[in-house]
Amino acid sequence: MYLTKEEEKILDGEYGEILRRCMNLLVSLGDIYGAERLIPITSSQISGVSYKTIKDVGLEFLEDFAKENVKVKVHSTLNPAGMDLDKWKELGIKEEFAEKQLRIIDAFKKMGVEISCTCTPYLIGNLPKFGEHISWAESSAVSFANSVLGAKTNREGGPSALASAILGKTPYYGYHLDENRKAEVMIKLDEELLNLLKSLKFGESFYGALGYLIGKMVKNGVPYFENLYKLNPSNDNLKSLGASMAASGGVALYHAKELTAECKVKEVVDDKIEKISIGIEEIKESYEKLNTTNDKPDLICIGCPHCSLMEIKEIAEFIKKHDIKLDCDFWICTSLHTKAILDRMGHTRIIEKAGGRVVKDTCMVVAPIEEIGYKKVATNSGKAGVYLPSFCKSEVIYGDIKDILKN
Ligand SMILES: C[C@@](O)(CCOP(=O)(O)O)CC(=O)O
Ligand code: SF4
């Protein structure tokens, strides 16, 4: 890989051991994937934050970095942690976990990373422009940035996103190159399914179920949705679809006619593309696979990826209208930023009166919910449906949140 004189110096350790390690990681990745050089990035989303996922090894690695006084060079935001950073005791998080989690957060803060603790950074001010090169971890955020926004990122892991944030660069390969961003499979919802969806006003869980199915089919390919726009999905629906495809498969980029950024201005489909038709049966099967139990939940949890303000407002209004009283715990996961507005608007109070809570900075996957004692989780997220059984050893009840709340 070609390196500038300055980059060579960093790799030789002239600017210290931490920068050398960061450069070494990026150069190794670049060599493996055939990058010709490094390119500048404008932002980074760093994952690997929860003590549950990174453990003591990760904590020590981050503290090593922080004590050498290295700082990030570009706007860098942080993925969810393993707990609400303020109200962790109320969630049932143990002291020892909290102490280590706060040390992780402190290390990131010292490096100049914004302690946003959300997987929807694009909703809180880390909003890359069309065509911009970025280095993001967190597979759902990667999918949203690449697809809905038309920014360019590979599916980074925590360490490579951090190294890129510190150096302000990323190796030029994969989804940074236009030739790798073409669609590979065309997905068409058949007429019968479209009609059913329109008539029944299928709720938000359809997008997670569809994503679950497509992710399994295309693995890490690039799908193109030919007629999804007919359902008029919201950005929240697209966020859910992308998250689910990234979880059941490895989809980091998708196109959807009329909906996503790149296919509006560029030809992304060629004539020879493989075509797949999706019908009612396949979607039903998806729901069946995501549902692992018929039992009642001990936790209802939504916000994977983190909920937007509008999603939560709608739920608060629904709770109020139907005078819902919950007989199990209910977490709505979101960012600190979104919660601040919810508090101010009175939505949090409505949710709390019904027995739920707005949980910020964390989520049902990266919080140690299995240690808290939850075993059966109801959710509307296809991504959570994939991860809950493995990350949290929990059973899953999958469906629309309004149905879950009414049952
Ligand atoms: C499952 C996931 O959403 C969260 C856990 O990741 P981490 O602990 O932030 O690396 C990561 C991902 O999908 O990229
Ligand atoms: S809410 Fe979902 S998308 Fe966000 S960090 Fe947790 S697992 Fe990942």
Image (cartoon, rainbow, N blue to C red):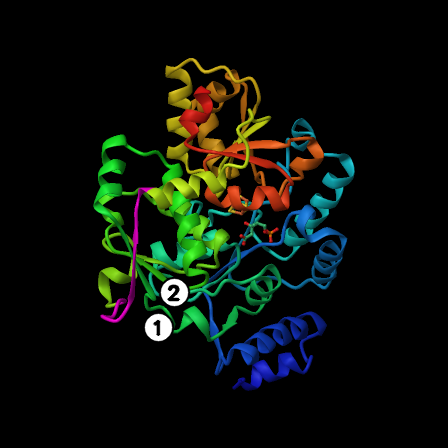
Question: Which residue is labeled 2 in the image?
Answer: 132
Residue found farthest to the front: 281
Residue 332, visible in the rendered structure: no
Residue at disc 1, secondary structure: helix
Residue in front for this viewpoint, 165 or 203: 203
Three-letter amino acid code of the residue under disc 2: Glu
Measured as percent of width and height from the top left, residue 284 is found at: 38, 40
Residue at numbered disc 1: 178
Q: Position of residue 81 (x, y in %)?
A: 62, 44
Decide: few, some or many residues near mark 2? Use Cα within 10 Å; few <14, some 14-19, many ≥20: some
Q: Nearer the viewer, residue 11 or 203?
A: 203
Q: Which residues are magenta?
A: 268-280
Q: Is residue 299 left or right of residue 176?
A: right
**What residue is rendered at 58% in x and 42% in y?**
388
Residue 190 higher or lower than 17, as above or below = above
Q: Residue 169: x, y in percent?
A: 51, 71
Whether residue 223 appears in magenta in the rendering, the answer is no
Q: Amino acid at mark 1?
A: Asp
Which residue is at the far right?
Answer: 96
Quick check: can you spot residue 157?
yes
**Badge 1 local density, few (<14 within 10 Å), some, or many (20+)?**
few
Vertical comparison of 313 with 112: above or below: above
Whether ligand 1 has any atom under 8 Å from the Cβ at mark 1 is answered as no
